[in-house]
Image: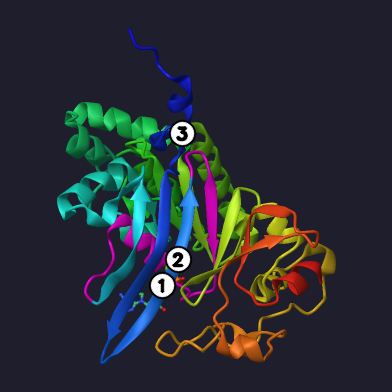
Amino acid sequence: MTTVDMTTLSTGEADTAPLLEVRDLHVEFNVRDDIAKAVNGVSYSVNAGETLAVLGESGSGKSVTAQAIMGILDSPPGRITRGEVLFHGEDILKLPENERRKLRGAKMAMIFQDALSSLNPVLSVGFQLGEMFRAHQGFSRKAAKAKAIELMERVRIPAAKERVNDYPHQFSGGMRQRIMIAMALALEPDLIIADEPTTALDVTVQAQVMDLLAELQREYNMGLILITHDLGVVADVADKIAVMYAGRIVETAPIHELYKRPAHPYTRGLLDSIPRLDQKGQELYAIKGLPPNLLKIPSGCAFNPRCPKAQDICRTEVPVLASVTEQDGSELVGRGSACHFWKETLNG
Ligand code: ADP
Ligand code: MG
């Protein structure tokens, strides 16, 4: 009789592969006679039970990366020109569309900024929630409705039983966003991508919806990618962060380390532009200039025209995402910066 080798059980390939690993992803769009390079070599990973925040100004390629992962890229004009998206260790970019469709909803789900345009206005929320169970799991109408109520209660919609037949427009913005979360959670996917899930909401409601999302993510042990242009929103819920600029990741770090010691001048600029309660009355810093035109990304470091620290090398050489270490060379786990002068920025 053979004995089971316990070491392979805990260190086998399937166990150690991250839930999601994006490798060197490139996405382009045909724009008239030109090509917009929206995503230029993005790599990131998320484990089960982990939250990755993806931060960057509008147009930096956050959503396009997410659409490529989900298989909902607007194509044409968009196309993936290079890279891999490994989900449970398998490159899903190679799967046929019908297989991708099966993954969506069931294994990976997405939450969008605008629930009103994502939900169907002429169907009740109960019907739309129930549809997940009818379409994917063959539930009866009655059983699906019971599941819909259960989900509405799960995301703390008051009087769920009475409101199950209401339409999307009858709910407040915050409640609609909770319904989107319920839709995403319905089939208990392994991965949720939330693209600016609270951007359209009032500040007080933002925090409640974000806390709910974080709570459910922990409870279901899901991987969560939280896309935002607002560093303030993700501080309390993310484990780690990837900062994007012009379709590249320019900094990665465990979230609290990024706040304490950014290693890229762009991240420093973003941090300095967050309003702080203890500095009332002071003028808020804003990064000068505008995000780059993706048809004409500046040579060298794409951030160089806006960077207070830029030198000659920054205009000619594209900085790679290098490991960030302490001055004595000791490793800073999970930290990387695509700045020629990360040492000065980290320690400055
Ligand atoms: P964000 O970081 O704000 O989410 P996006 O990922 O949505 O930015 O977009 C990045 C860039 O990709 C845009 O600035 C635009 O140039 C290009 N892009 C995105 N979607 C399309 C599209 N459907 N058609 C053409 N270009 C697009
Ligand atoms: Mg976006």
**Amino acid residing under circle 3:** Tyr
Residue 207 horizontal side relative to residue 168, left or right:
right
- Asked whether the residues under the numbered discs 1 and 2 touch, taking CB atoms below 8 Å apart as contact, a structural biologist would say yes
Q: Does the beta carbon of the residue at mark 1 sit less than 8 Å from ligand 1?
A: yes
Distance between the alpha carbons at the discs numbered 1 and 2: 7 Å
Q: Nearer the viewer, residue 179 or 110?
A: 110
In terms of image quarters, where does ligand 2 lie? bottom left
Element on which disc 3 rests: helix
**Amino acid residing under circle 2:** Val
User: Residue 303's spot in the image, x, y percent?
Assistant: 59, 82
Residue underneath mark 2 = 42
The segment highlighted magenta reads 47-76
User: Residue 68's spot in the image, x, y percent?
Assistant: 33, 62
User: Residue 275's spot in the image, x, y percent?
Assistant: 72, 68
**Amino acid residing under circle 1:** Val
Mark 2 crowdedness (10 Å alpha carbons): few <14, some 14-19, many ≥20: many
Residue underneath mark 3 = 220
Element on which disc 2 rests: strand
Q: Residue sitting at 28 percent across and 52 percent down?
A: 92
Q: Is residue 176 visible?
A: no
Q: Residue sitting at 30 percent across and 71 percent down?
A: 81
Q: Which mark is residue 39?
A: 1
Q: Residue sitting at 20 percent across and 37 percent down?
A: 136
In the picture shown, does residue 78 fall above or below 178?
below
Quadrant where the image shows the C terminus: bottom right
Mark 2 or mark 3: which comes first in sequence? 2
User: Residue 133's spot in the image, x, y percent?
Assistant: 24, 35
Quadrant where the image shows the N terminus: top left
Quarter-of-image position of residue 202: bottom right
Camera-nearest label, 1 or 3: 1
